[in-house]
Image: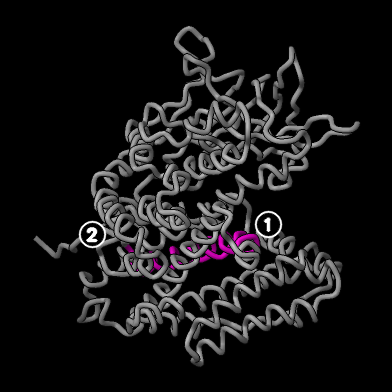
Amino acid sequence: MGFQQEDFVYHDLFRENTFLKDVLHSLCDSQHVGTIESDLAQFSKRASSTILDLMWKAESHPPQHRAFDHWGQRVDEIIVDDAWNEMHNIAASEELISIGYLRKSAEASRLHQFLKLLIFHPSSAFYTCPLAMTDGAARVLELENGPLKESFFHKLLADRGDDFWTAGQWMTEKAGGSDVSQSETVAKQEGGVYRLYGTKWFTSAVTANLAMALAQTPVDGRNRLSLFLIPIRDGNGKLNNIEVLRLKDKLGTKAMPTAELELKGVEGFLVGELGAGVKNIATVLNISRLYNSVCATGTILRLHSLIRDYSQKRKAFGKMLIEHPLHQQTLLKSQSEVHACVLFVSEMALLLGKSEMTTASDSEAAALRLLTPVAKLWTAKKAVNITSELVEAFGGAGYIEDTQLPRFLRDAQVFSIWEGTTNIMSLDTLRAVASERVFIGAFDYLSGLSTDISPSPELDKMKKLMEDCKDGWLQSLNSPNDREVAARMLAFALGDCFCGLLLLRFAQSTQKARDLHLAQVFIRNRDHVDFENLERDSERNQKTLLS
């Protein structure tokens, strides 16, 4: 028998090395760290064994749409594998939603939850997608007072699968996409209740129990978007005046059912004020965008673990891959960015936790507002780029389906598209910095981080980048067109600056050579920001593109 390559191993991410444990200890107070660490350790072991097995099964049996029964009656049944349903039970029993709301670890509760989701996601077959929307719906209901909260909030926090409800988020329509103002769904009052009519072009979590949906309603003589809670199914589990037009054939995320739906008079309950739908749905969006960041980060954390393992088992040109200096450089750069992503989402979890407990300072609240879209776009792009680099690092094995590696590449692309593309997130960053309170407060927060770090050339470089972002934005951009053109550069530069500071602070906390080295590698690869040399002539740009 000829040569047989040893396979790579899906290690327990929490126990593989000390990194995640060190992150927890560096950010969490001693009162709660022991309980959280114990929970993450047991769950990580489960995620790399039995939950991982469920993922392979769910991925191998994608959902199907059964439109009619054998008599031709419309049934619109979405058939999913038992493994997908078991993910639901796991999410409930592991309290993946309720951790963030029971707040047993006070301000660190979101950190506990996000680190747990980070470990869960790469083994979840993207069950984290319905969880993201469930969490967003839970936060909307938590802020409500009245019958909606009393009826539904506790269902989204249940710790038993049979009692646990998940939620969808239905905004995307053919006419609008991210421009939800173009929504054509309407809500009509019929018999004292609102009923929604229209087509939702892209709806994940169609197997959920309820959905948050936008619809046009008449307000002061013109239509405005309002937010509605829709119970998706009746007491028999059948869809409530909802018709499934088709399941989406997607590039990746194959185990997760995503559908195009026709709303044919489904009853909806008004959430918040009439006409304030965009404002109210923002709560859901901010939560789901942070989930996007967590899931993108979990993906590359897992893939980096696999390539490090493989690099110690694959021999080429007389020595192991890990012994080749060029291979080392490739992995070192990507590992510095993986660690940066983990620290980014962990810090955002703390900011979110403080905000929800109303203990955040003004600068922390401003940083949360500004850095939420930055976190989404920055980690999403890193996931796409790093996944491509690491799948390539496996050589030919990275292109062969039965290694399960191509799935990482297909799935990674969703992160930069779901919940708003990179340009949409850049425009949201632009909206945030338009507020002087947010702009000044967020930079005060970044400055505060820098004062906690010992002087070094790397710190000087990050402080210079921070000054370039602040001063360059104020001094170089005088028109709305200039600011829009520069928005993407600003967002990525803010992400670079924030992560560089977090890596330096983390290395100072752990006092480990590994962490200082990775901080130095990361900062060495950061470019300065230059708003002066952007191509700003919009008319000329358009002519060039269309010529």
Q: Residue at x 50, y 47 (%)?
A: 251
- Horizontal side of residue 309 vs 530, given as left or right: left
Q: Circle 2 is placed at which residue position?
A: 9
Label 1, secondary structure: give it.
Answer: helix
Q: Residue at x 51, y 78 (%)?
A: 500
Q: Is residue 60 visible?
A: no
Residue type, mark 1 in image: Ile
- Which residue sits furthest top? 71
Judging depth in this view, the residue of 263 and 343 nearest the camera is: 343
Q: Position of residue 347 (x, y in %)?
A: 49, 65
Q: Residue at x 26, y 71 (%)?
A: 311
Label 2, secondary structure: give it.
Answer: loop
Please provide the residue range marked out in magenta: 368-396
Q: Position of residue 424 (x, y in %)?
A: 68, 57
Q: Quadrant of the C terminus?
A: bottom right
Q: Position of residue 497 (x, y in %)?
A: 57, 77
Position of residue 167 relative to residue 462, above or below, is above
Judging depth in this view, the residue of 135 and 146 nearest the camera is: 146
Q: How far apart are labels 2 and 1 at the CA level?
A: 38 Å
